[in-house]
Structures are given as structure tokens and as C-alpha cells.
Amino acid sequence: MENYIVEMLNITKEFPGIIANDNITLNLKKGEVHALLGENGAGKSTLVSVLFGLYQAEKGEIKKNGKEVKINNPNDANDLGIGMVHQHFKLVEIFTVLENIILGVEPNTLGFLQKTDARKKVMELSGKYGLKINPDALIEEISIGMQQRAEILKMLYRENEILIFDEPTAVLTPQEIKELLKIMRDLAQEGKSVLFITHKLNEIIEVADRCTVLRKGKYIGTVDIKDTTKEELSRMMVGRDISFNIEKKLTEVKEVVLSVKNVTVPSKLHKNNAVKNISFDVRGGEIVCLAGIDGNGQTEFISALTGLEKVSSGTIILGGKDITKSSIRKRSVSGMSHIPEDRHKHGLILDYSLEENLVLQRYWQPEFQNKGFIRFHAVRNYAECLIKKYDVRSGQGPITMARSMSGGNQQKAIIAREIDKDHEVLVAVQPTRGLDVGAVEYIHKQLISRRDCGKGVLLVSLELDEVMNVSDRILVMYEGEIVGELDPKKTTVQELGLYMSGAKRNTVKEIDNAE
């Protein structure tokens, strides 16, 4: 009989209207990287939340080193050496990175906080594992990628021996992902046990020893990675064959629908500008991708483009109208849809129902209101239509609280709302973040269908495969400037990487002359 460090035996967890985990057994060996794979809403996050003490299972038991344990809350989990990096970060936004890492285990002398030794330990961990941070930066002012590093360091600081990573690579750059996968292997070789939730099959093949697959809350099977393939894993996950090739037909590029001219955006983190005098056009019938390593001005630019922040100079023209100083609603009404980077902060109102979130951009239209009163029947019918069309899974359908849905299904709800809305330009920031391969396949088809309908799509992505396969043109941002315009058919991932790292740059004029 195998000796497992953790055994989750016959776990059943229910929520209103849904059995999230239906009699699931998961066994974790000491010193292994064990992947947990499944569609959005398959029950992966719920299962590890039971292990971490965030939820209590109705049935089943948990054993550590062969002995049954009771995990009533995360403090119990930490006492047992179980740590977790959450899919949606558990950070206090007005605290610094260092304060968040040591929160709950603060070193003190006679009740006085002693940060010096804690800072030294955090920076040593940062250097050892390649997790570069600014310990004094406020969480609310740093990028999502940097917040992810803080979460990982928070777990390493506590010296946990069982490490749960819930979608840890969803917000990281390709370079950061490569580093993180190496960290996982190193941690396993040090004798720690890693439980790794991801939708990315390439990462599982690269880093995991074994993989357990869930589908619709049920256990499908556990396989040794050396004995399986990407195609077999995807079949186990979604119950059908998945196409990994993105098919795009040639389309006629139409007139300019979005024009950005000499736009500069100030930085909140330092005195320099985050975006420096950038200009480009997006035409109907094309997908333009803004690529770059996280933290090079993409977030600030999109905030200015969509009205969340103000530009310090320059103009933004949408459909021939100057929207530089327009409100967010005016931009929306003028033909801009926006799939935001942070679905919790800017995409959803978490304590509203799914149907209320689906009409956030349209509730004032005659279709959904009469003389200032919401037509709830029309809202319900519209929500049910979108839920079915975009396969948004939720325990109680339209009345489900957005907060209670899985991260992937929250993302699908935003995508449904924004794509269904009449628009000239779709601004899609990390649209497939946290989605399973079946959903990614579907979203890519939706983006391409927008392009084929003559709409303009501005895609912001950190996924190199997505950048190369979905885009018609690639604009590379580095330190707030556009340093290259590339044709995905004529460039390579290696060349794109050189532009993204700042090792290579050119201008649009240089490309035009070369052609």
C-alpha cells in the first residue's frame, strides 16, 4: 500500500442547487507535483478549499500521514503544514507586500512588531526562488503578477510542507510561468508535496508527476503523466476531442474604428509616465494584440482607453468620435466593449446575481426598463439566453450570486455580456485567463467571429500561443512604449520574446520600409 502524505477519501461537498464534489478521492504523495485538472466548475477549487479548511465537507474524511485529521479553518491547515495560493488573492489592499506576507504570523517582542528579521527572511526567499518583489509597495498599487508572487511568498514564509497552487499561472507571463514551474520541481525535490490546479495541459505535461481529473463534480481518474498525452487529458476533462488548432479565414480589413494618437498616461507608482506617447489604429475586421511582459504599461493604457483613468495628453477616437474625456458609459454606448483584466474589481459586482451582472451595461435600455422600472421578466429571459449560449454554469441559474460561482464561469459571464453587446471595438484583456481548454477554444472562436463580422478587436494577452495564433497584428509594449509591430505569420516566438524583453525594437515606419 502506498504511503500518502494526504488522503482525501470520498469527499462530498454540496451548495444550493449543486453537488460541487461528489464522492471524490484524492491521494497526494510526499515529494510529488500532483496536478488537479477539470473544466470550469468541475469542483477543483472546492476540493482544495475543503483541504485548506475554507469549506467543510458533508461526507468523507481527510488523513495526513495515515491519521485522520479535522480541518475546521485555515489556521488548522497551517498548523498541519498545509499552505495555499488562492485563485483569487487573499490580500489586504491597503497593506504593503511585506505586511501581507507576514500577516497572521507577525514576529514580535513584548507585543511590538519586529519587521527587520521578517524582511530579511522574505527577501532571502524572494532571491532563492526568483520571485522579485518590492516589499514596501502597497498591494493596491502593484500588478496582478506581483500580487501573485506575494501570495506564493506568503506560503513559503510559513514553511508549509503541503503546497496548494490554485491556478497560479493564470496571471503570469511566459517567463514567470517557466520560473514558477521550476520552483515547483525544486520544492518537490526538497521533499515538499505540491497540489497544482491548472487548465493548461502543457504545464501539466512539463511539471507534474501525476494528474487527477474531475468532471462536473465527479472523479474521472488519476494517471501517471509519463504514460499519457495532452489529447488524452483533454478528453478526460471535457468528454470530447478538443481542437488545438485555431482556424482563421482571410478577411477584408475595413476602416479604422479605434485610433490612439500620442497618448501618455501617468504612473501611480513613480514619477515617470506609465505610457509614453503611443499611437496606433485598430481597423474593423482585424485582431490587434498588445503584447508585453506584465508591468510595461498595458494595464495603465487599457485603464485610460476604457475610461477608468485619465490620460495626461493625447486623443482617443472611437468610430470617428473623440472619447478622450468621455465617461465609461459614454464609451460603452459609443461602441466599446471591455473584458477587464481583474474580473472581481472591474468585471462583476460580486454580491449581485448572475442576471443582474449580465445586464449591467444595458439595464437602462428600453428592452429592460419602462419609465425607470426594471422589467425583471425581460432581464430573466435575456440572462437565461446568454447562460445557455455561452455555457455559463451556476448552481441556481440566473439568480446565482456571482460571488459563489467558479472563477472560470465568472469570466464566461463577463465575456457573454461584453460580446453580446453591440460594439465596434472589443477590448479583451486576458480573456481566457483561468479558462479550461474547451472554454478557451470557444472564446477564441468568439473573438475571431467578432473580427469576421467586421468588428475591431484589441486583445491584451500574456499567453504567447494566444498572441501568435489569434492575432492579425502584434504591437509589443516595453516600458510604456510600442517598440515593435509584428506580423504573426512572419515572426517567431523567439523574436517576439526579444521585443518583449526590450532587447530588440523598431518602429512602424521601419517595418513599412522593409516591406
Image (cartoon, grey):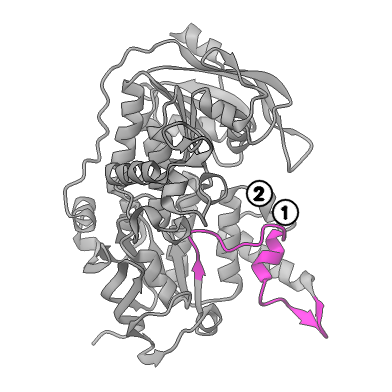
Residue at left offset 43%, top offset 37%: 368
- Nearer to me, 150 or 258: 258
Specify whether residue 98 is painted magenta: yes
Q: Residues within 10 Å of mark 1 (few under 14, many from 20)?
A: some
Residue at left offset 56%, top offset 70%: 155
Question: Magenta residues, as a range?
Answer: 84-113
Q: Position of residue 135 (x, y in %)?
A: 71, 58
CA–CA distance between discs 2 and 1?
Answer: 7 Å
Residue at left offset 62%, top offset 65%: 125
Q: Are marks 2 and 1 in contact (CB under 8 Å)?
A: yes
Mark 1 lies on residue? 137
Q: Residues within 10 Å of mark 2 (few under 14, many from 20)?
A: some
What's the amino acid at mark 2?
Ile
Q: Position of residue 390 (x, y in %)?
A: 31, 43
Dot 2 falls on a residue whose secondary structure is loop
Residue 142, label in figure:
2
Name the main secondary structure of what is drawn in magenta. Answer: loop
Residue 118 in sight from this viewpoint: yes
What's the amino acid at mark 1?
Ala
Name the residue at the bottom extreme: 67
- Nearer to me, 302 or 189: 302
Specify whether residue 324 is painted magenta: no
Relative to 461, is 106 on the left or the right?
Answer: right
Relative to 73, is 327 on the left or the right?
Answer: right
Dot 1 falls on a residue whose secondary structure is loop
Residue 191 in sight from this viewpoint: no
> Picture quarter containing residue 421?
top left
